[in-house]
Amino acid sequence: MLLTNWEEIILYCFVAATAIQVFYYAWFFSRIAFYKPKEKIKSQQHPVSVIICARDEDENLARNLPGVLVQNYRSTYEVVAVNDNSVDDSKYILQELKKTFKSLNVVELTQEAKLISGKKYPLSIGIKESRHEVLLLTDADCVPASEFWIQKMQDAYDDDIEIVLGYGAYHKRPGILNKLIRFETFHTALQYLSYALAGIPYMGVGRNLSYKKDLFFRNKGFSSINHIPSGDDDLFINKVATKKNTAIIIDPEAVTRSVPKKTWAAWLKQKSRHYTTARFYKSKHKFLLGLYVGTQFLFYPLFMATIIFYDWRFAIGLFALRLLVQGYMLYKSMGKMGEKDLWPWFVVLDIWMFLYYIIFAPALWRKAKRNWS
């Protein structure tokens, strides 16, 4: 009798995990798979301030900043580069670029901010120094995928929109590490972009993010999260984004791309730092994200347990159901987001996420270091 009860418990848990996973793919992620931008009756070109903060990133500035400075944008735009206490050649590279590009506004910071962690202080200074209402944020290690990046991002604004969420991707490189990094980045974007389409925006990424200057000052900037080392992008958006004031843009020409980490150690360090902010999200967001991650993590152990303790045919049937829904939604979504080469690997990458959660789960409770990132 006890064995029968355990068999039934395992079965019911597997059915529940499968149903929840299918629900997330069908209800949330399908919004990206079948995404079609709304047709705009009129298109306005807003003056834009692009803000980039950098510390000791002379090579990235030399490589990527020209791609921002040569944007094909007929309206007014400026690039505010905040050089935050760099000790490398960043200052001289910015001075040389300024000779050629008059739209470049360089802000030199020579003192550290006290009691303010991460890049919130230099970003705040950059926003204060900017001249325009529409702010477009990216990082020094990012380059726009096209010369129409500014045009595409600002065009998502409408009467009530104050935030535009974009996709910050990584360059394609050979090797399995590159695929893992890109899939994790795509998987994260799939969630925050689809949640925004569902009216539940919860984060954005500073590699490709836009919002109004008035929104920033109306909410007292980063004052409520200054004590947290990270969060200048995701925690700020988590605080101020609403169903009505947030839009997304999915367009190959509106993507930014970064150079991915080349070693496992560097990537593990980067991701561990990023996840230290998740515990500060709003409760409803933590519940929705936790339910998805929890069932994704338990899916494969429950699948194996159902095969062993119940009926392998029933287990295969449920596995196939999720696989079909997941495969179709990922195929469509990866096509929309320029990551279609990852699709043949999606089963392996999905199984990898089981190990990924084990590796990075401790970061959710670990205290973040107070470093610039």
Image (cartoon, helix red, strand yellow):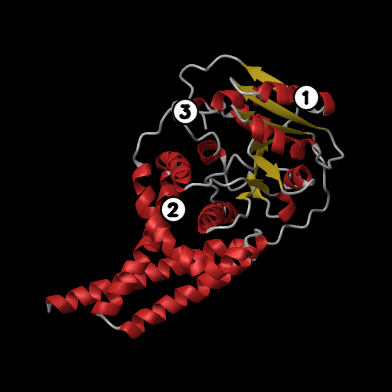
**Cα–Cα gap, marks 3 and 1:** 29 Å
Q: Secondary structure at mark 2?
A: helix
Between 176 and 294, which is closer to the camera in this rendering?
176
> Which residue extends farthest right?
74
304 vs 362: above or below: below
Mark 3 or mark 2: whose residue is earlier in sequence: 2
User: Which tag, 3 or 1, sits closer to the chain's start?
Assistant: 1
- Mark 2: few, some, or many residues within 10 Å (few <14, many ≥20)? some
Please identify the quarter of the rendering in which residue 2 is found: bottom left
Q: Residue placed at 44% from the left, 39% from the top?
A: 273
Q: Amino acid at mark 3?
A: Asn
Q: Can you give x and y, in whole percent of width and height, for residue 225 in the image? A: 47, 29
SS category of the residue bearing label 1: helix
- Give the residue type at disc 1: Glu
Q: What residue is disc 3 on?
A: 371
- Helix, strand or loop for disc 3: loop
- Residue 220's spot in the image, x, y percent? 56, 25
Can residue 135 be seen? no
Dot 1: within a 10 Å radius of its alpha carbon, few (fewer than 14), some, or many (20 or more) residues? few
Quarter in which the N terminus is drawn: bottom left
In this rendering, position of residue 247 left or right of residue 20: right
Tell me the number on the disc at residue 96: 1
Would you say the residues marked 1 and 2 are in contact, meaning their CB atoms lie under 8 Å apart? no
State the residue position of label 2.
289
Disc 3 to disc 1: CB gap under 8 Å:
no
Between the C-alphas of marks 3 and 2, the distance is: 27 Å
